[in-house]
Amino acid sequence: MNRTYELMFIVRPDMAEEDQDKLISTLESAVTSFGGRVKSIERMGKRRLAYTVRKFQDGIYVLLTAEGSGGLMHELERRLRVSEPVIKFLTVRIDEEQKRLDKIKAIRAAKRKTSSTPAAAEAAGETPAATA
Amino acid sequence: MTEETRAAAGSTTEAVVTPERPERTERPERTERVDRGERRPGRSSPGAGGGREGGARKFFRRKKVCKFCVEKIEAINYKDVRLLQQFVAESGKIVPRRLTGVCTPHQRRLSSAIKQARNIALLPFAGRA
C-alpha cells in the first residue's frame, strides 16, 4: 500500500539556511524510518503570503514529495506541528490524480495514432509541444 | 405570471450586464481577450436584429467555452497560482461557472484546487493582501 503524497510547508522567513537543512534532513530520516521513500525535495524560495500567518507577511516554501503509508504522513504532520519555525503545511495525496492524468495521456496518444492522415498526426504532435 | 416574470428577468439580464462588466474587467486579461475577439464578429450580424426592436440594446451573447477543455489542460494543481488566479475575483471569491464558462467537472477540480491554494497561503481567502 504505497501512496504518493505531496507535503508543502512554509517556514518563517527569518530562518537560517542551515536550520532549514537540518529540518529537512530530520524529515527525510523520518520518512525512511517509516519505510517510505523521499521522491524529491524542492525549495520554492521566499514568497509573499496571500494573508498574514502568525504575523508573518512572507515565508519560505518547501515542497516534499514522498511515497509511503498514511501513518508516515501522520507522523510527518505531527512533527511539523511541533516544530516551531513551520508556520503552515498542507498534505495532498497525488498518486490517484497522477493515475488519472496518465490515463488521459494514454487515451490521447492512442487517438493520435489512429488518425491515419499524416497531416493530422503532425498537427496533433505539434499541439502538445506548444502547450508544454 | 411566471411567464411575465421570466420575460422581465430576460430584460433585466440585459440591464444587469452593465453592472457585471466591472466584474469582468477584474478577470485576467487572457480570458477577456478571448471573449472580445470572438464576440466582435457575432455582434455585427445580430446588430441588424437589434435594430428591429428600435434600440441597440439587444446584442448577441457569445457561447462561453471551457478554457480547460479548449486548451486541454487536465492538471489543475493548487501550485499553479497563475492559472487559478484567472478564476478568482479580486475579492478572492471563486468566479462562478456562469461567468467563466468552465464546464462542471473542471469547475469542481478548479474550486478544490483554489481551496487548497488558499489553505497554504498562495491565494487569499478574502481581498488582495
Image (tube, helix red, strand yellow):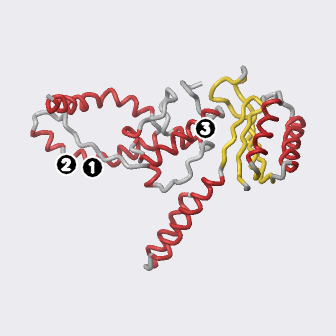
Q: Mark 2 falls within which chain?
A: B
Secondary element type, mark 3: helix
Q: Are marks 1 and 3 on the same chain?
A: yes
Does the CB distance between marks 1 and 3 fall below 8 Å?
Answer: no
Of the residues shown, which amino acid type is indicated by label 2? Ser
Q: Which mark is residue B41?
A: 1
Most foreground residue, A75 or B76:
A75
Quadrant in the picture for residue A22: top right
Left-right relation of A96 to A11: left
Most foreground residue, A52 or A45:
A52
- Residue position marked by numbered label 2 in the rendering: B45
- Residue position marked by numbered label 3 in the rendering: B116
Quadrant in the picture for residue B117: top right
Of the residues shown, which amino acid type is indicated by label 3? Gln
**Image spot of residue B46 (x, y percent):** 18, 45
Does the CB distance between marks 2 and 1 fall below 8 Å?
Answer: yes
